[in-house]
Image (spheres, helix red, strand yellow):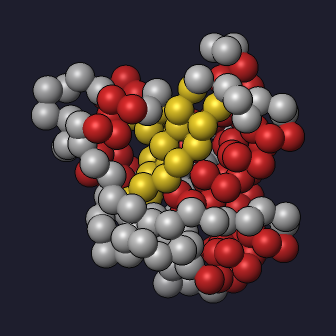
Amino acid sequence: MKKLLFVCMGNICRSPTGEGIMQSVVEKAGLSEAIFCDSAGTIGYHTGERADSRMREHCSKRGYDLQSRARQFKAPDDFENFDYVLVADDQNLQDILRQDHGDEYGHKVMKLTDFCQNIEADEVPDPYYGGPQGFELVIDLVEDACVGLLDHLKKEL
């Protein structure tokens, strides 16, 4: 089984969206037994909370149900338990790699946008302080990246 961990700062917008969309993509591909998805944040401010209500609303309009609760990334456990740690942006990348004290897990950490196939993007921008278009952009980017990620994972299964 491949285990994927989606990571953003607070685990209330981008990473639960990654988790929810990827779960949907995996289910539609009939690979639920082969791929597990989870999400975490680099900070613990929102631990136990559901995804941001605006993010849930925008995702719901596209058929995605974000059910997870926020939690903070825990090293070294999350490094050891997951095959891929998929971060939203460069700051998340730095924050996660900083927790890899022995430089053992860097090969597992990558930006989610590395898997985008149709949209050219270097990061999934944080929509928290913006308007509706920011949430829609996040979903567009994550949908594209998750399809590309699934294509990549199929080669490893």
Residue 58, given in percent of the width and then of the height, sits at: 74, 75
Quadrant of res 20: bottom right
Q: Position of residue 26 (x, y in %)?
A: 75, 38
Position of residue 97 relative to residue 54, above or below, is above
Quarter of the image with the C terminus in it? top right
Image position of 152 (left or right of 28): left
Point 48% across, 43% down: residue: 5
Q: Is residue 68 visible?
A: yes
Q: Residue at x 46, y 27 (%)?
A: 83
Question: At which x and y percent is residue 80?
Answer: 33, 29
* Along the viewing direction, whichever of 88 and 34 lies nearer the viewer: 34
Front residue (pair 86, 56) = 56
Q: Residue at x 72, y 20 (%)?
A: 154
Q: Residue furthest front?
A: 33
The answer to whether residue 152 is seen in the rendering is no
Residue 20 left/right relative to 105: right
Q: Is residue 10 above or below residue 133?
A: above
35 left or right of 87 in image: right
Task: Give the vertical position of 94 relative to 68 (above or below).
Answer: above
**Residue 92 location in percent, x, y?**
36, 53
For residue 42, what is the image quadrant? bottom left
Q: Disc count in the image?
A: 0
Residue lying at the far left of the rendered structure:
101
Q: Where 87 sits versus 32, above or below?
A: below
Residue found at x 44% / y 38%: 85
Quadrant of the rendered structure where residue 37 is?
A: top right
